[in-house]
Image (cartoon, helix red, strand yellow):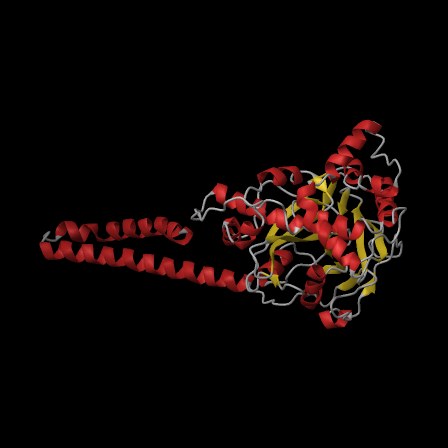
Amino acid sequence: MAMVAATVPSLLTDLHSHFLQNSRAVLCAPLGPSLIKNKKFNINTQVRARKVNAGAVAVDNSRSQLRGRFYFNITGFPFPLGPFLSRPTLRKEVVKGMIWTFEQEQALGFSSVATNIRMTVIKLRSGGLWVHAPIAPTKECIQLLKELKAPVEHIILPTFAYEHKIFVGPFSRKFPQAKIWVAPRQWSWPLNLPLEFFGIFRARTLRDEDRLTPWFDEIEQKLLSSPEVGIGPYVEVAFYHKRSRTLLVTDAVIYVPKQPPETISKEALLAAAKNGLAVRLLSKGKNVPNEAIVDNKETRQKGWERMVLQILFLGPSDLLEPQRTFTQMSQKLIVSPIVKTLVFNKVPEKVKNWVDRIVTDWPFKRIIPAHFAAPVSASPSDFKAAFAFLNDLLGEKWNVGPILSLSLSTILGRAASYFPPDDMKTLSSLDEFLVSVGAVKKTVSGRKK
């Protein structure tokens, strides 16, 4: 449609020129039926030809766009990470001339559950780019990055997580001169494969508060490296960009937006809105109607809310009517219920120490996580409030910050870390099962056993 619209002014100009060039001949000649008929035929032929050409250009552009977004991936355990063939990329400028985010859709296997995955790019004083948590290096993604007109100097893998690790190798091959830096203690499951298996070669290791990194004057880092909570340790490196006062994390905290991210496809949202098997199983015994799916704002919103609850809780209590729980979980900074239950609850002292160091040393004003909304306007007090559940685990008072009174801090902290008990049942049962079979430990550190 855009190409056809762009052709209309040109077509009118050509017709006007054609009329002026031939007006004298037309006026001097007899206006017989055959002449009028021939003129109409010529003009109609030009119109049809231009429409066909415009349509062909639009098709070519569409095909070119599809080729630019192509990325084939069917790997992942226990579920492959989609989309399997096409990954559109969205670039946003967070701080003018300094920080950009690049987002793609990330789906869970063959399900209708999807969210976004984010790469953050910072321009260093050297003029080079520092790339945090690379995403799929499609032609479109690489072109958007090259439009920044700066060389990629450093590629950062800030976690052990497979969903971020899988793209580092292919991405680094697009920029062979860049140095690769990875979080320590990398592992994978069910097979503990070396980094080279993922195409990551000659990688340097990120160290806690390392003052020898080439970017230390601009970006500081703090490492959370837990003891083995079961199969392997939880490892994440947080970064602080001083000039922009920006905190970068991977999975430690999230901010669920009310509306779905732009990168999630319409098809995925509509599929999630269908009253399928998952809704029938997770509907609190209510009658589930067989409703036809109508593509509108309300239907897409329902799909988004259902996606979020499945991502956060695995098995929420009510997928048929997700609004109540979605409202409780969205538009605030939280720790994901999965990460809280299966990881942070096991190592509260380690997590508390990491959080304390972040909020004490870094006066950030925004947070960029690797999923859901970003940037998030948040202070150290907001960040600490999201971890208020550590109070109960460690059995001690933990002030959220000097700006707030103790009572208000406690209220905000509990609000940020409160999860509806009915929705937590599946996660709690899963945790108990994994503990019973020895897959994870009940508590690795902390006073509760």
Residue 269: percent from left, percent from top: 53, 50
Q: Which residue is at the far bottom?
A: 197
Q: 239 above or below 196?
A: above
For the question of whether residue 156 can be seen, the reply is yes
The residue depicted at 54 percent of the width and 47 percent of the height is 303
- Tell whether 365 sits left or right of 44: right
Closer-to-camera residue (50/279): 279
131 or 405, which lies in front? 405
* Figure check: 340 above or below 332: below
How many discs mark residues in the rendered view?
A: 0
> Is 66 left, or right, of 154 in this rendering?
left
Nearest the eye: 146 or 172? 172
Across and down, in percent, residue 152 comes to 72, 60
The quarter of the displayed image where residue 411 is located: top right
Q: Is residue 223 above or below residue 390?
A: below
Q: Position of residue 84 (x, y in %)?
A: 57, 64
* Rendering coords of residue 235 (x, y %): 81, 56
Residue that appears at 65% across and 47% down? 372
> In terms of image quadrants, where is residue 334?
top right
Left or right? Give the position of 441 relative to 304. Answer: right
Q: Does residue 127 appear in the picture of this structure?
A: no
